[in-house]
């Protein structure tokens, strides 16, 4: 549809169009950014005229021009409900049914295949696009350091010099930072070997196809994205590695942190072991002096763990010894002779407990088997504390919302949009919800980026919470919408919206998907607000007099 | 003053309570004075008009429907009075050139609407620009944006049709933009 003449938008802004014409204009506005901008400008102009004539302080008007909210909601509700129903169905099927094993890897809640896929992707990239991963890693590492530096600089300089300079400073730091300035990163396309008898007196960060340590590293060893890491020698510090295959037959004096597909420990770790892998094996001669924590599809312990063992994933098999307690969240626990557990065995199962303790295996303390009880969806509505908690959460969210409103009022501007806008927010929110954790993990994988990743994770979690509040405020606004504006105080608007939202997401069956939709839409909204605020800031930068 | 307090005053004024009526009018006295100033220009004529409006309002008060808001009703009376005065001053019943009232031929592409640049410090510049407009453009702007009347009410006051009011307002805003852009462009 072609645009209407400006005179029509002037009439629309003044609320003087006939209903038929108004509908036509509104339909057009939904799809035309340019005309929306015009209507926004006309509204601002009208407000400026009124303010000037009333000789009163102008109130900032940032309300985006939108068709009648009731209409927007009506447009949005049907597809949103359809999406909720579909999402509810899909999630319900995934959670409630066991998929046939052939497509089990599709289930995002299970570990099967995820590592395989992730590693295959990484190594495919590595093999097919040589240099790309190295470049990304270097960029991520430098970017992390530069971003931290820039953040510090901007905090310091903002007071005196304004944001323009801090952006320039950030760019300068980013451009001037060299790898040696950040950390000693070494990239090798082929193999890296530290031969027996050789000692490296420093922390080593290495990225290569295969890494073999036969000598001594007198510091930490950090290995990024190698295919194979073999440690036959001695590491006097900690080991942090993300490798496809890890084989340790030497000694690690500190802790071992491994993200990998297969990890096999046949040597000695004098500290703790943390592993996130598909398969972790502590071989017969392997020894972990302190605690072992594994999240893996399969964990088999043939050697000895000095203190506690924690395992989560599919299965755990113990033939060796554990000094203290064993705590599991796996589906199958097997203790074969001559397994020996010094303390208690605590096994929590999600389904039917599968636990086998062979005659030759011994458990010093108690064996406790529990099934994680999924409370009935309707049960909780019968308990008073459910409503108490609802009240507490409502109060907390209201307080946070009021605080935010005082600090960042722009966050709560605008109205519940049209169907199209709702879905755009939803899409942006979905992208943000997927991209942010990936960015955090990638950043954390570079190790130097861990501080940045932690900050990012904190920001992300905060955003998830705030997203709900922002959506609630919008809901509240459209509830209390009377005669073209909201006359109620913000606290009341927020409380009304939060009450509706919280009751909605607490409903059985539709509640959880509704929560997902609300959070994603809110997240998208926050991203859009941040974007427009940033744009406004860039545009509104003080020009020279 | 909130709606309830106004209603209570209206109720009391209805019973002939002169004090209540004075208090009621007092709430909006400044608005009436402003409206008269904007429509007639600053000076004794505007003050006269404001006093005259007080008397007219008291006479017309019996016909006021308490279910409707008071301010628009009052400002409509004030607007009527000002338009009457302007007509008398022009010695002609027709305030507007019929050509001004043609709704057709309102081309796009003039200066774009005033943005927030004009919001904060330049409010007084905006008022000055409104005051400087010729009456046939100033009146619709003041009636619309200060008296907050709808097109039908403005049309009745000015003896025009709703469409003509739309065209008048459209032109008036354009002219305002044009003037402000040519004077304020360098300062912004």
Image (cartoon, coloured by chain):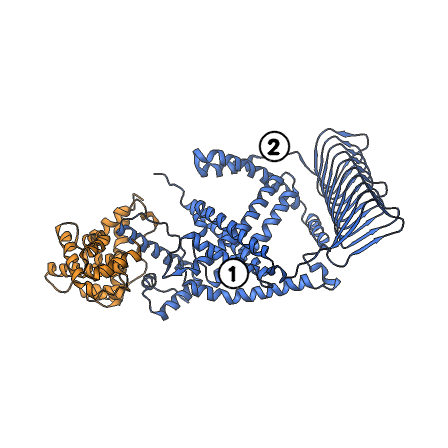
Q: Secondary structure at mark 2?
A: helix
- Which is more toward the observer, B173 or A434? A434
The relative height of residue A539 versus residue B162 in the rendered view (above or below) is above
Drawn colour of chain B? orange
**Residue A181, image x, y percentages:** 61, 32
Disc number for residue A181:
2
- Which is more toward the observer, B89 or A216? B89
Q: In the rendered view, does A427 fall on the left or right side of A30?
A: right
Drawn colour of chain A? blue
**Residue B82, image x, y percentages:** 17, 58
**Residue A79, image x, y percentages:** 53, 66
Subunit of mark 2?
A
Q: Residue furthest left?
A: B91
Q: Count neighbours of disc 1 (C-alpha within 10 A) and say few if under 14, some if 14 to 19, many if 20 or more.
A: some
Q: Residue at x 54, y 61 (%)?
A: A504
* Placement of the C terminus of chain A among the 4 image quadrants: top left
Which quadrant of the figure has residue B153? bottom left
Q: Residue at x 66, y 43 (%)?
A: A445
**Residue A429, image x, y percentages:** 54, 55
The relative height of residue A283 versus residue A48 in the rendered view (above or below) is above
Q: Which residue is mark 1?
A: A423
Q: Secondary structure at mark 1?
A: helix
**N-term mark: 2 or 1:** 2
- Which is more toward the observer, B73 or A50? B73
- Which is more toward the observer, A267 or A33? A267
């Amino acid at each position: 549809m072609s645009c209407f003449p400006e005179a029509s938008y002037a009439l629309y802004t003044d609320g003087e169009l006939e209903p038929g014409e108004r509908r036509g204009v509104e339909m057009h506005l939904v799809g035309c950014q340019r005309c929306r901008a015009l209507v926004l400008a006309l509204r601002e102009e009208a407000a400026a005229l009124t303010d000037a004539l009333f000789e009163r302080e102008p109130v900032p008007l940032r309300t985006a021009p939108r068709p009648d909210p009731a209409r927007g909601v009506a447009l949005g509700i049907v597809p949103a409900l359809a999406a909720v129903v579909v999402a509810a169905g899909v999630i319900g099927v995934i959670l409630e049914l066991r998929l046939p094993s052939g497509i089990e890897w599709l289930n995002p809640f299970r570990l099967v295949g995820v590592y395989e896929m992730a590693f295959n992707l990484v190594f495919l990239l590595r093999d097919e696009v040589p240099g790309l991963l190295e470049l990304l890693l270097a960029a991520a590492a430098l970017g992390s350091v530069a971003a931290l530096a820039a953040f510090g600089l901007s905090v310091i300089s903002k007071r005196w010099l304004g944001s323009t300079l801090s952006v320039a400073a950030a760019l300068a730091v980013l451009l001037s930072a060299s790898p040696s300035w950040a950390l000693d990163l070494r990239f090798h396309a082929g193999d890296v070997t530290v031969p027996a008898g050789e000692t490296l007196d420093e922390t080593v960060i290495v990225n290569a196809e295969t890494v073999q340590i036969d000598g001594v590293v007198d510091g930490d060893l950090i290995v990024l994205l190698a295919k194979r890491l073999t440690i036959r020698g001695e590491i006097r510090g900690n080991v942090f590695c993300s490798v496809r295959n890890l084989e340790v037959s030497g000694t690690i004096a500190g802790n071992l942190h491994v993200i990998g597909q297969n990890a096999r420990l046949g040597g000695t770790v004098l500290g703790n072991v943390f592993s996130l892998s598909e398969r972790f094996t502590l071989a017969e001669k392997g020894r972990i002096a302190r605690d072992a924590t594994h999240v893996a599809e399969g964990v088999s312990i043939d050697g000895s763990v000095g203190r506690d063992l924690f395992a989560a994933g599919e299965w755990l098999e113990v033939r060796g010894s554990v000094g203290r307690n064993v705590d599991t969240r796996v589906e199958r626990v097997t203790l074969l002779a001559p397994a020996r557990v010094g303390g208690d065995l605590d096994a929590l199962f999600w389904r039917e407990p599968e636990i086998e303790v062979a005659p030759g295996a011994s458990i010093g303390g108690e064996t406790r088997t529990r099934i994680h009880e999924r409370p009935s969806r309707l049960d909780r509505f019968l308990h008073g504390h459910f409503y108490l908690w609802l009240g507490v959460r409502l109060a907390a969210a209201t307080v946070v919302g009021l605080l935010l409103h005082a600090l960042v009022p722009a966050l709560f501007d605008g109205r519940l949009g049209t169907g199209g806008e709702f879905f755009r927010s939803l899409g942006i929110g979905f992208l943000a919800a997927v991209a942010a954790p990936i960015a955090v993990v990638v950043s954390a994988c570079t190790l130097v980026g861990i501080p940045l990743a932690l900050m990012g994770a904190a920001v992300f979690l905060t955003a998830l919470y705030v997203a709900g509040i922002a959506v609630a405020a919008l809901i509240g606004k459209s509830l209390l919408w009377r005669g073209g504006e909201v006359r109620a105080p913000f606290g009341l608007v927020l409380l009304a919206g939060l009450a509706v939202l919280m009751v909605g997401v607490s409903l059985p069956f539709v509640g959880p998907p509704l929560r997902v939709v609300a959070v994603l839409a809110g997240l998208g909204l926050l991203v859009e607000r941040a974007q427009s605020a940033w744009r406004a800031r860039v545009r509104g930068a003080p020009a020279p007099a | 003053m909130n709606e309830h307090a106004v209603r209570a005053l209206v109720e009391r004024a209805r019973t002939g309570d002169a004090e209540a009526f004075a208090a009621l009018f007092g709430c909006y006295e400044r608005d009436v004075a402003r409206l008269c100033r904007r429509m007639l220009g600053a000076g004794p004529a505007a003050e006269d008009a404001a006093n005259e409006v007080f008397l007219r309002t008291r006479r017309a008060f019996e016909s006021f429907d308490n279910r409707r808001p008071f301010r628009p009703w009052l400002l409509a009376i004030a607007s009527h009075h000002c338009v009457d005065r302007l007509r008398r001053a022009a010695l002609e019943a027709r305030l507007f050139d019929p050509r001004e009232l043609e709704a057709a031929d309102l081309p796009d592409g003039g200066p774009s609407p005033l943005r927030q640049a004009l919001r904060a410090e330049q409010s007084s510049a905006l008022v000055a620009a409104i005051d400087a407009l010729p009456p046939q453009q100033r009146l619709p702007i003041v009636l619309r944006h200060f008296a907050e009347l709808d097109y039908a009410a403005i049309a009745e006051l000015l003896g025009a049709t709703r469409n003509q009011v739309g065209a008048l307002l459209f032109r008036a805003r354009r002219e305002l933009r044009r003037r402000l852009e040519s004077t304020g462009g360098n300062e912004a």
